[in-house]
Image: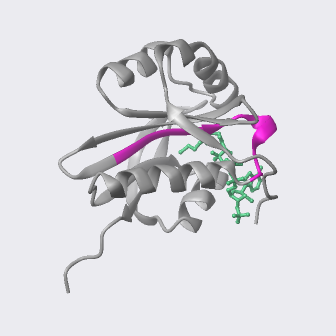
């Protein structure tokens, strides 16, 4: 278990005014980061983009595309100094709850095979491994495979 948080995380929708902080964190957290354009396109497309704050400080974000009763978790990122306090899991639970309220049936995501922390986070939250997408991500040498994971949100009729 991660160390518990003293402050309760607060969630709100991402706005264009947040993009400077979002992009700065994206650059810290990923070797192959999204661009500012990727985030502004996500906002323009109506993707579900959220910010999480702790003690008034911006600490992370998530981006989810939805359609046809399914959701695709495209990005989830917590600031390095705030990691390992349960915020990644808390944000994932927040996203999952909002998607349930929207009557979404399933969440899909891709995660790098080498991202042991991300894979652990998703597995502990109940995501199961569906398979791999070959060469999905750019990598320092060539390409890296993605693991595709799925979380059903609604019980199937028996
Ligand atoms: C993945 C990420 C969102 C997790 O955020 P976080 O706030 O640290 O996550 P939590 O504190 O909720 O911890 C989730 C699990 O990961 C584990 N974990 C987190 N950081 C870890 C680390 N550096 N080493 C080992 N385990 C770690 C925690 O122990 C916890 O597992 P547990 O419940 O079995 O204890 C964060 O590491 C991050 O932003 N990474 C860079 C971006 C990224 O890879 N995003 C996912 C892409 S698909």
Quadrant location, the C terminus: bottom left
Give 57 or 107, whichever is nearer the viewer. Answer: 57
The reply to whether the magenta stretch includes residue 61 is no
Range shown magenta: 72-85
Q: Position of residue 41 (x, y in %)?
A: 36, 18
Is residue 148 something one can see in this rendering? no
Residue 143 appears left or right of 57: left
Residue 69's place in the image compared with 25, above or below, is: below
Q: Residue placed at 41% from the left, 16% from the top?
A: 40
Q: Residue placed at 27% from the left, 60% from the top?
A: 105
Is residue 126 something one can see in this rendering? yes
Residue 108 appears left or right of 10: left
Quadrant location, the N terminus: bottom right
Q: Position of residue 74 (x, y in %)?
A: 43, 39
Q: Residue placed at 40% from the left, 55% from the top?
A: 132
Residue 24 appears left or right of 44: right
Q: Position of residue 76 (x, y in %)?
A: 54, 40
Farthest bottom residue? 158
Give 149 or 36, whichever is nearer the viewer. Answer: 36
Residue 101's place in the image compared with 34, above or below, is: below
Give 69 or 26, whichever is nearer the viewer. Answer: 69
Residue 21 appears left or right of 106: right
Which color scheme did the rendering employ for the protein? Answer: one colour
């Amino acid at each position: 278990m991660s160390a518990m948080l003293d402050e309760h995380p607060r969630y709100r929708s991402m706005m264009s005014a947040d993009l400077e902080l979002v992009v700065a964190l994206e650059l810290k957290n990923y070797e192959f980061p999204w661009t500012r354009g990727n985030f502004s396109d996500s906002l323009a497309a109506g993707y579900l983009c959220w910010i999480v704050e702790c003690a008034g400080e911006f600490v992370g974000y998530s981006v989810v595309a939805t359609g046809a009763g399914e959701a695709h978790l495209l990005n989830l990122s917590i600031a390095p100094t705030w990691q390992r306090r349960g915020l990644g899991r808390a944000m994932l639970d927040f996203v999952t709850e909002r998607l349930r309220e929207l009557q979404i049936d399933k969440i899909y995501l891709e995660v790098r095979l080498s991202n042991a922390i991300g894979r652990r986070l998703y597995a502990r939250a109940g995501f199961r491994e569906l398979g791999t997408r070959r060469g999905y991500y750019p990598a320092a040498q060539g390409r890296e495979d993605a693991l595709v994971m799925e979380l059903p949100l609604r019980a199937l009729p028996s």
